[in-house]
Image: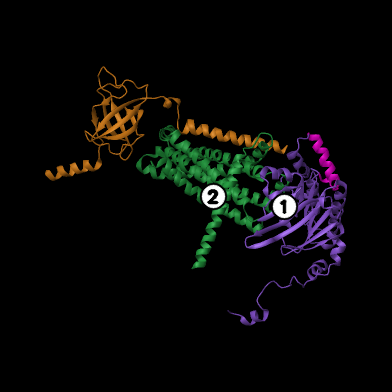
Amino acid sequence: MRMRTIELGVGAFIFAGFLALVVLIVNVSGLTLSTNEEGYRIYARFENIGGLTVRSKVTISGVAIGKVTNITIDPDALKALVEMEIEPQYDYLTLDSSAAILTAGLLGEKYIGISVGADEEMMADGDEIEDTQSALVLEELIGKFLFNKVNE
Amino acid sequence: MIDQLQALGFTGLNKLAALGRSFIMLFHSLCYFPNPRVGFPLLIKQLHFVGVLSLIIIVVSGLFIGMVLSLQGYTILVDYGSEQAVGQMVALSLVRELSPVVAGLLFAGRAGSALTAEIGLMKATEQLSSMEMIGVDPLRRIVAPRFWAGFISLPLLSMIFSVVGIWGGLLVGVDWLGIYEGSFWANMQAAVDFRIDVLNGIIKAIVFGYVVTWIAVFQGYDCIPTSEGISQATTKTVVYSSLSILGVDFLLTALMFGDL
Amino acid sequence: MDSLDDYIIEIEGMTFSRGERAIFDNISLRIPQGKVTAIMGPSGTGKTTLLKLIGGQIRPDSGCIRVEGLDIPKLNRGELFEIRSRMGMLFQSGALFSDLSVFENVAFPLRVHTQLPEDMIRDLVFMKLQSVGLRGAVELMPSELSGGMARRVALARAIALDPDILMYDEPFTGQDPIAMGVLVKLIKTLNKTLGHTSIVVSHDIQETLSIADYIYLVADGHVVAQGTTQELLAETSPKVKQFMQGLPDGPVPFHFDAPDYLQDMLGGEQ
């Protein structure tokens, strides 16, 4: 019957649409349920954040463990205050960890790399990383290099 | 001079009146979500007409656009040694922009114009009037199912477009140009965020579905019931809905990604 | 006319204009119950518009249109759809729903307005189609019908709900003589057997005169003449005579309004 083929076609169409949605969710955006879990927040102050933006990733040895959630200026120290959200399963950041703003490749995006120290105590929500290293700004680097050359 | 001013005012008033009529029509037809007994078969028929029949053009163009994106992206990115980013580029541009916009434009051309012509023809052959005289509101019987069908179809079509496009990109990037498949997916998954990218793309598609069907149905319903009027209305549908898609897309992009 | 109470439709002082142009100017007419009333007049005098006004599809600027005592322009959407279920209208083109078969077309009003079981609907549809002589075409689609057949199916659809009022919009236009004869016979017999009121809008004089009990002649937004067939044929006013006898020139001029011919030809370039 004609109505039957139409209904079949529409059913398949709607099914295909939702299948596409599932593919988009699982394969393309790599959404996992764990991202819904609240991580804990830590802070770090930097002299210069270069091109770091909200949603940049936070890594240990290049493995993403969280993301930047907010960037403001600390009015007292006049430094950039970066708020990061670390996923809860990474609970072994020591208090003397250091954070550096790194670049993926020569022109790639900026991200934060954390090196874990040797302290006994671990970081908790609201703690701050004291030991920070600012972004390398290419212009400054070139400027210094030229300045040294002139001085020689 | 005065005459021209008057003509301008006349046109302006006419456009405004048409806009008003279209809002009334929108309101009336949205009130009638198809009820299970009578409406569902009608809705199914229209879903077939605007959705299933648009599938081929959507799939084919999605595939080719994905392939082209992949190829173009590769030739540029390979110079910087970052050809792994092709997956991310293809996925982001498809999910955020190209799927809703291109699927919307194709939908306007394929389904929108057909809707206008069909309703216009019904008007010209007095089918709408006679339905009214039988005591059935044509807004309910003719317009509302088409409205909902367009509204449901485009988001689905857009998502299918995305997936087929990404698959096309994978085909060219991985199988042909030899990008490592793992990094293709990994880069894509790292860059594409469900809420920010996928969901916003779907919202765009929903809005476009709305805009296109609204314009198409209204142009058909409001056309001058002659063969000339119908052909004019069909052209108007394609032009207006294409322009609205592009304009609304900019607006939505600014709202979603522009940190406004 | 039998008595004054027997008017099913009364139009009083109704004015309707489209843009600047007045289609009807303070027009009044009454349609007697159970009879065939013809509304005649030259093309473009708004005869179809009159039917749409009666059906409430458009609203007049002023005046009232009473159908079975209800003032149409004052009804709301719901009441309007209610009263329309008691009116049938046969459109000029038939206006069959092109995506439905002949059966579904005739069944359409039944399905919408009644909760009858399927086998009863089937019987009713076959009865209605039998009365217009097209029971054999029940499986066809509207695109497979000839113009005359389409109009007969539309007639079957219009009488599906046994309406009180049946309106025919130019039923004879563009029909071959046989189809025309069939329609004339159908309008007459249906009116007799079903006992509804028929309103025929037409400018086909011979056919209309042969079935109409009462005739209104409308021109320039007014009722120019009214009466039975004999009364109208006996009318001597030039306007009526021109129309009834189909003369090319008369009060309705052969030439469309234009500046003086000689001046136009000599004036040339201005």
Residue B174 percent coordinates (x, y): 46, 37
Query: Is C73 situated above or below C232?
Result: above
> What amino acid does circle 2 point to?
Ser
Q: Which chain is green?
A: B
Marker disc for residue C228: none
Q: Is residue A85 magenta?
A: no
* C118 falls in the magenta region: yes
Find numbered disc 1 in the image and state the secondary structure of the residue it sits on.
strand
Camera-nearest residue between A19 and C200: C200
Instruction: Name the residue tied to disc 2.
Output: B241
Name the residue type under label 1.
Ile
Q: For the residues tagged 2 and 1, is the chain the same? A: no
Q: For the image shown, how many numbered marks are present on the structure?
A: 2
Q: Chain of mark 2?
A: B
The residue labelled by disc 1 is C65
Distance Cα–Cα, label 2 vs label 1: 41 Å
Q: Nearer the viewer, residue B185 or C50?
A: C50
